[in-house]
Structure formats: structure tokens, C-alpha cells
Image: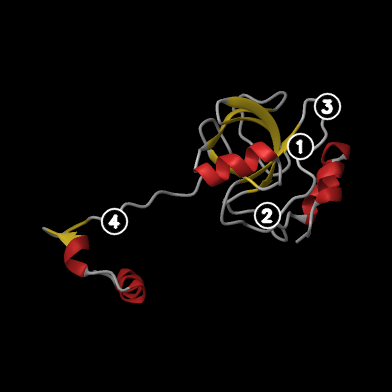
């Protein structure tokens, strides 16, 4: 067992006999995806009624489509418009936070965050409850309303 794994195990106080059996590692870890794709789980971060209900009930909010023109692979980044399913309904939203590694000066988040919008582009909620990246100001007028209702920018 190398020193790095040993330090992680000691820091998290995990029992070694459950991790190492027959000389094989039993920890499963996957790489963080660098984008939002179909079936990516999201977290609604505005105070819309449907978003709050879904989060309280523990319902999954999943991305089912990324609106991108001229792309062979539709992968969503910060500021991209997506279609999500929430409590059996389809809603549109904008990605305002990603777990993926970002470019310098753009923050990385603990969860994949989405702000729901109506068909005309107005946000469904009246405020965003988590900080959103200042980078979204440069993404054009589509995100200006979301930046305006944000509580904090980072």
C-alpha cells in the first residue's frame, strides 16, 4: 500500500480490513466528468416552488438535453442552457455551477447547480440561494436576469 493511500485511510479513519481483501482494493472512485451530459444529476439552487419541493422530497433532477448549436457531442459547461426533468415535468434551466475542474479564476463547486427558467427566459424563482460565478456576467443577456437575482457572485 503506497503512502498516499495510507494517509487518506488514516485521515478518514476507515477500517483497513474492509478495504483490503485478498490483496485487492475495494474502494471504487470515478473521475469527475468535465461537463454536463444526459442523465447528469443536478441541484436546483433557486427558490422556485417546484425546485424546493423536489429537493425536500429527495427527487432527482436530471439533465436530459443540452441546448448547443453546431456540436457533435452535446456537453454542457457553465452558462449553457439545459433541459431537466423534475418531478415528472420538463423544465429549462441554466448551469450555474459544476463539480468539474474549471479554467483559472473560475470557481469549482461541490454540486452541479442549475437555475430554472421559463420558456421566455425569465427565472422561475425570485432569487438564487448559492453564490454563482462572476464569469456568467460575460455570457450575454440570456444570463443577465440570473446574475441580477443572485445573492452573491464569486
Which residue, given by chain and number where applicable, does mark 3 sit on? 120
**Quarter in which the C terminus is drawn:** bottom right
Left or right: residue 8 compared with residue 150: left
Which type of secondary structure does the marked residue at label 3 adopt? Answer: loop
Residue at (63%, 44%) from the top-left corner? Answer: 52
Where is 6 relative to 131, above or below? below
Which residue, given by chain and number where applicable, does mark 4 sit on? 27
Along the polypeptide, which appears first: circle 2 or circle 3? 2
State the residue in front, 18 or 68.
Answer: 18
Along the polypeptide, which appears first: circle 4 or circle 1? 4
The spot of residue 114 in percent (x, y) is: 66, 42
Q: State the CA–CA distance, disc 4 to disc 1.
A: 40 Å
Which residue, given by chain and number where applicable, does mark 2 sit on? 103
Q: Nearer the viewer, mark 1 or mark 2?
A: 1
The spot of residue 150 in percent (x, y) is: 79, 53
Which residue, given by chain and number where applicable, does mark 1 sit on? 124
- Asked if the residue at tag 3 contacts the one at tag 2, i.e. Cβ–Cβ closer than 8 Å, the answer is no
Amino acid at each position: 500500500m503506497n503512502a498516499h493511500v495510507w494517509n487518506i485511510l488514516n485521515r478518514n479513519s476507515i477500517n483497513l480490513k474492509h478495504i483490503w481483501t485478498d490483496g485487492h482494493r475495494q474502494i471504487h472512485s470515478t473521475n469527475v466528468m468535465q461537463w454536463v451530459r444526459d442523465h447528469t444529476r443536478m441541484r436546483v439552487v433557486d427558490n422556485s416552488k417546484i425546485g424546493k419541493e423536489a429537493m425536500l422530497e429527495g427527487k432527482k433532477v436530471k439533465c436530459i438535453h443540452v441546448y448547443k448549436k453546431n456540436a457533435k457531442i452535446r456537453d454542457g459547461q457553465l452558462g449553457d442552457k439545459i433541459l431537466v426533468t423534475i418531478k415528472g415535468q420538463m423544465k429549462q434551466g441554466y448551469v450555474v455551477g459544476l463539480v468539474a475542474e474549471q479554467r483559472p479564476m473560475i470557481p469549482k463547486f461541490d454540486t452541479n447547480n442549475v437555475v430554472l427558467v421559463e420558456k421566455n427566459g425569465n427565472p422561475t424563482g425570485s432569487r438564487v440561494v448559492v453564490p454563482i460565478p462572476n464569469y456568467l456576467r460575460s455570457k450575454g443577456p440570456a444570463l443577465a436576469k440570473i446574475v441580477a437575482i443572485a445573492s452573491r457572485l464569486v
